[in-house]
Each structure stands twice: as C-alpha cells, then as structure tokens.
Image (spheres, grey):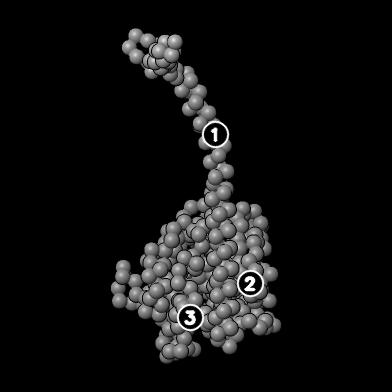
Amino acid sequence: MFAGAARQKVSSRALRSGTKGELREGFTLIELLVVMSIISVLAGVLMPALGRVRRKARTIAGMSNQRQIGRILHFYALDNDELYPDSVATIGTTGQPDSFTWSEPTMLTGYMKRSPKLHRSISAYLRSYIADASILFCPSAPKKYKYLQESWDAGDDWDNPDTGPVPDPVFGTYCFYWNYIGHLGGGMLSRGPTGLAERPGYGRVLVSDYFGYDHWRSRLCFGSCEKFRGAGVAEGTSASSAFWTRPGNGERAELEQLKIGLSACYTDGHVERYRPSDTTPIRVIVTPGGSVPWPSGTIPGDFYLPSNGVR
C-alpha cells in the first residue's frame, strides 16, 4: 500500500513538472499583459509618493544641517568672547582693510584676506568644529560642488587645481548672515548678528537657504538651492555650486505665487520654514560701510532674507 502511494506521488510530481507529452502549466499572454498593466498602474501611483518622500527627506536633512551650523556657531562664540566669526563674504586686499567691497552671502571662501588678522574662509574659523563639509551644503541643490571637501580642508590656503595661480573663491548653496551687511534700500542696512548677545538693529538669522533674483548666472530669474516647480538648472562654475532657477519678474505678487519651501536657522538655535512671500530683498553693497549698493540689474542680484530676521 505504501509503495503504491509513493508511485502515485511520483506520478503526480511528474505531471506538474511538465514532462514530455504531459500537460504544462504556465501564464498565457493575456495573463502576462494583465500583470504588466497592474505593475504599471502601481508604479504610476507610487512614484509621485516616493518623490515626495525623497523631497521631504532632503528638506529634513537641510534643516538638520542648518541646526548644526547654528549650534557650532554657538560653541565657537562660547570659545571666543561670545562673538561669531567675521564674515568672509568680501572682496578684499591684504593689508588694506578699508578698501574691500562686499560679495554674496553664499561665500565659503573669499578671494583674499581683507586684512592680515582676518581669514578668507569660513573653514579657517570653524574647521576644528566641522570636519564634514557637506553640513555647509544644501542637499536639495542640483549638484554638489566638485571640490567642496577639498576647499574646506584647505581653508585659507585653498587654490583650485582647475584654474591658474590666483586666489580662488568658493560660493555655496546657503547664505551665511553672521556679521554680514546688506542693503535694504532707502538708506537702510541689514546687519547680521555679531554674537550671543542680541544687539538693537541687528538681525537674528545665522544661515538660510539661498533664494534670490537676477543672479549673474541666471539673469532675470529666481534662483534657489531648493527646487521650484518647473525649474531648470544654473550650472556651477569652477568656484560655485549649481542651483535651481526659473524666469520671473521679481515682483512681490510673483513671490507670493512661487511654490517653494525655504528654511533658516536663527540665533536662538531654532530652524524655521518660510515662504518666498515672507522675505525681504537685500542687495550686495559696494562700500565697506554699506551706503552704496550694487545697482539693480548688475552682477550679484538680490538675496531674499526671512523678514522676521531683519531688525
């Protein structure tokens, strides 16, 4: 009886295995098409959701970067008479501190030292607190700067190997506003925070996402390290990072319609989200004291600072 049962099982397995002359089991063409259709529908449903998840993850990573920068500036100030580092966003001449002009607040490394006592790079001030330069880079930007870590490690001695023997700047994807002076228009200045103690007339924003208008690499366009709807890419250069861009007229009504989320870290350490309509434009200034801005339509363009950080 047991032998008969075993032969029956073997025969049954042989039938299922599809030996020659026996019945085969498999998918028909229609069944395969149905399965492929289901997979396509699921992919169409899931891909947008996955894209949103990725964007959210990059947003969270960017806010974490800014929070770390704020914390590190706090530690630096505790070690340095409660003062933040000097701004490196200048174009200076060594030994002539009164001859410099300001530059973009995105600057990580300047062209040259403004004076022998001041550094030309943020790294020279903060490298002992920050080892990984990616903290200084917005993860939502299109591409990372090729020599971001190398330039950070080199500090004041940075010299781009792709260019000639001249001082090479580095422009990042965040705006660094500590000790930075910008022009608000009407003779008004925007002065960045100088240290742990709040000072009347000085701002509260330490670092923010880059968001601006009419940059020299993207004329008559909005630009940001955060992606716009329908945005293109302003490619990076040997000294700067790529950013997202789209045409616009720069008017307040258009700012209110832009679908983009931005973030900034404040002097009390908190990181806050804000919209383009919640900003105030500032212009890069030409003179050390800040009385003369670059004219509208010239090289640097406008930079938008969170309005609640302006004093």
Alpha-carbon distance for marks 2 and 3?
Answer: 19 Å
How far across and down, in percent of the image, does residue 309 sit? 66, 72
Q: Amino acid at mark 3?
A: Tyr
Disc 2 packing (10 Å; few <14; some 14–19; many ≥20):
some
Residue appearing at x 43%, y 83% in the figure: 113
Residue 247 sits above or below residue 99 on the image: above
Secondary structure beneath dot 1 equals: helix
Residue appearing at x 49%, y 26% in the figure: 35
Residue located beneath label 2 in the image: 269
Q: Amino acid at mark 1?
A: Leu
Residue located beneath label 3 in the image: 125
Residue 103: which numbered mark, if any?
A: none
Residue 244 sits above or below residue 306 on the image: above
Secondary structure beneath dot 2 equals: loop
Of residues 31 and 138, the one drawn nearer to the viewer in this rendering: 31
Horizontal relation, residue 261 to residue 149: left or right: right
Residue located beneath label 1 in the image: 42
Residue appearing at x 34%, y 9% in the figure: 21
Of residues 287 and 45, the one drawn nearer to the viewer in this rendering: 45
Of residues 87 and 54, the one drawn nearer to the viewer in this rendering: 54
Q: Quadrant of residue 45?
A: top right
Alpha-carbon distance for marks 3 and 1?
Answer: 51 Å
